[in-house]
Image: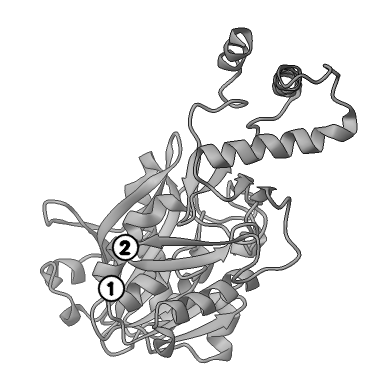
Amino acid sequence: PNHLVEAVRKLNVNICPRQLELFGDDRTIILPPQAFEGQEFLSILQEARQFQTCKAGNKTHAIEHGDWTSVQKDFWRRLARAHNSSRIARKGAIDPDSSIRESGHRLVWPHVGIPDSTGPGSPSWIRVTEQGIKQSFDITRVMFSRGNVSEKIRFGKLVKEGDVVLDMYAGIGYYTLPALIHGRASFVYACEWNEHAANALEFNVMDNKVGDRVKIMVGDCRKLAKQHNLVNLADRVSLGLLPSSEGGWRTAIRALKNRCGGWLHVHGNVPVKEAEGWALWVCRELSNFAREEGKGDNLIVLCSHMERVKSFAPTICHYVADIFVGPPEFQSLIDNQIILESATRAGILQSDSSFLPSPADIAPPSCALSPDGVLSQEWMR
């Protein structure tokens, strides 16, 4: 009836979104948190069902409480069929105080909630193919960010054939897989503390036929690095933890090769106005760690590029700083003498190829980890 169509149009977009997200190779529908819920929507659904019942020649009746499950299941089935989808899930939040970054997504149809089983073939197992890379995981147990695809591509291009890479926060292989497949790294050490993500990574490296060039370790990367002696071996370290990877910087420095140094790719959620100051501060901190860890006095710390990955909030963005740490003769981006004459031998290569040194007394940005700061979670420190 026209009045029902008009009632649907008047619903808040949070309740009745104008378009739906289709996710994964099987076009799973991802509902916003409040979509198709609430008394107003359910009343419209009830009247629509009663109209259909009456039209079919049956006596009009109110829907009993026990009948709502079948009514909602019928709605989900019709919604899935309209979008050529076989599954519906509802988006959930990620607990900021959780170190394992579990997904908050929950299945809606045909299965509900978090299935008891997980792994290939289970109700919540999904595959997302990007740039020819197959990434499978449990959508109710593991987080996935579609906004990072450009950074995955970029990282795959940065990795050089033959590189040894340490991925300190590997997840399901967001950067491990591009390093192996597109970058042709000779070997990747991948650390991950969410057991479900690590299991998915085990599956993904085999599914993409690169399992012979990776070692997957489950647990806190800082402890794993000590247990497995991950020192003096890496050409490149990925620090892809948000909102901050600060807790892993010293471990990353230890992992770099002593003779030639290497590259750190430092991720962080940073206020836009503080982006340059953040990069300068990171360089200063890394320089201090390198000296404390005995990497030698004749080294430089140079941030050659800052990549803006995506917006995290109105004034905060996800950035990645590409930072070389090592002897000056192993970089050719800028005149080494300029860097060596600076107080900290650390700083930023600017867009005009000039060098901006990092002050020895630079103050930490607001996004630095601290017990009483914005980012105070113990697990990140």
Q: Nearer the viewer, residue 70 or 244?
A: 70
**Quick one: which residue is furthest to the front in this view?**
57
| Residue hosting label 1 | 182
Q: What SS does tag 2 mark?
A: loop
**Quick one: which residue is furthest to the top in this view?**
3
Circle 2: residue type: Gln
Can residue 225 be seen here? The reply is yes
Can residue 194 be seen here? The reply is no
Q: Residue at x 39, y 88 (%)?
A: 213
Q: Work out which quarter of the rendered image holds the C terminus and state it.
A: bottom right
Q: Residue at x 51, y 91 (%)?
A: 229
Coloring scheme used: one colour
Say whether marks 2 and 1 touch (CB < 8 Å): yes
Q: Residue at x 40, y 54 (%)?
A: 148
Q: Residue at x 72, y 40 (%)?
A: 73
Circle 1: residue type: His
Among the two numbered marks 2 and 1 on one chain, the one whose residue lies closer to the N terminus:
2
Q: What SS does tag 1 mark?
A: loop
Q: Nearer the viewer, residue 80 or 274?
A: 80
Relative to 76, residue 243 above or below: below
Residue 98: x and y in percent read 67, 58
Q: Residues within 10 Å of mark 1 (few under 14, many from 20)?
A: many
Residue 322: x and y in percent read 30, 64
| Residue hosting label 2 | 131
75 relative position to 28: left or right:
right
Q: Residues within 10 Å of mark 2 (few under 14, many from 20)?
A: few
Q: Nearer the viewer, residue 180 or 308?
A: 180
Q: Quadrant of residue 356?
A: bottom left
109 relative position to 70: left or right:
left
Q: Quadrant of residue 336?
A: bottom left
